Image: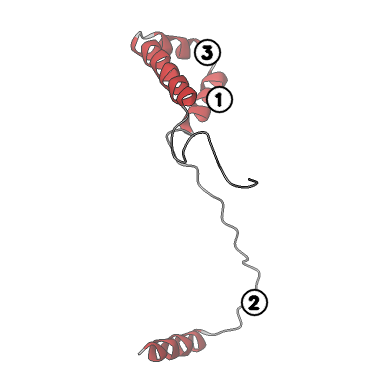
Amino acid sequence: MKGKKTGGRQKGTPNKVTVMSKVAIADILTDYNESGLMQSDFMLLKPIERITIAEKLMQYVVPKMQSVAMDVNSEQTKTIEDRLIELSTLQQEKK
């Protein structure tokens, strides 16, 4: 049957291999950090290398900001009075 799922994992069921891999990596990193080696190894790096690594790690902690484009060169054709009249008309229509 084309387009119909007939076997395999049910929707929403986590992939066991992925879960196991994430747990294994988390355990290794936890042990590495708790041993104090992570901090000492980090401090042995050149400053530019530390900044590069810190920047890469930050993306997992600090949300990335989206850039916003604004067209500041567009001509404003409505005056404040026109906009207020428009808003009051919309408000009256809602009643």
Q: Nearer the viewer, residue 37 or 5?
A: 5
Q: Quadrant of residue 40?
A: top left
Question: Badge 3: few (under 14), some or many (20 or more) residues near its Cα, within 10 Å?
Answer: few
Which residue sits at x=65%, y=72%?
A: 74
Q: Are marks 1 and 3 in contact (CB under 8 Å)?
A: no
Reading the chain from its start, which is encountered first: label 1 or label 3? 3
Residue occupying the far front of the picture: 1
Mark 1 residue type: Thr
Q: Are marks 3 and 2 in contact (CB under 8 Å)?
A: no
- Residue 88 rendering spot, x and y as whole percentages: 41, 89
Query: Is residue 46 left or right of 43 when viewed as pictured?
Result: right
Mark 3 residue type: Leu
Q: Check residue 75 in the rendering and tell me which mark sits there, or answer none.
A: 2
- Residue 48 rendering spot, x and y as whole percentages: 57, 21
Disc 3 from disc 2: Cα separation:
53 Å
Instruction: State whether residue 35 is above or below residue 25.
Output: above
State the residue position of label 3. 45
Dot 3: element: loop
Disc 1 from disc 3: Cα separation:
10 Å
Which residue sits at x=44%, y=20%?
A: 20
Disc 1 from disc 2: Cα separation:
43 Å
- Residue 33 rendering spot, x and y as whole percentages: 38, 14
Which residue sits at x=36%, y=9%?
A: 36
Which residue sits at x=46%, y=90%?
A: 85
Reading the chain from its start, which is encountered first: label 1 or label 2? 1
Q: Are marks 1 and 2 in contact (CB under 8 Å)?
A: no
State the residue position of label 1. 52
- Residue 76 rendering spot, x and y as whole percentages: 60, 78
Reading the chain from its start, which is encountered first: label 3 or label 2? 3
Q: Quadrant of residue 6?
A: top right
Question: Badge 1: few (under 14), some or many (20 or more) residues near its Cα, within 10 Å?
Answer: few
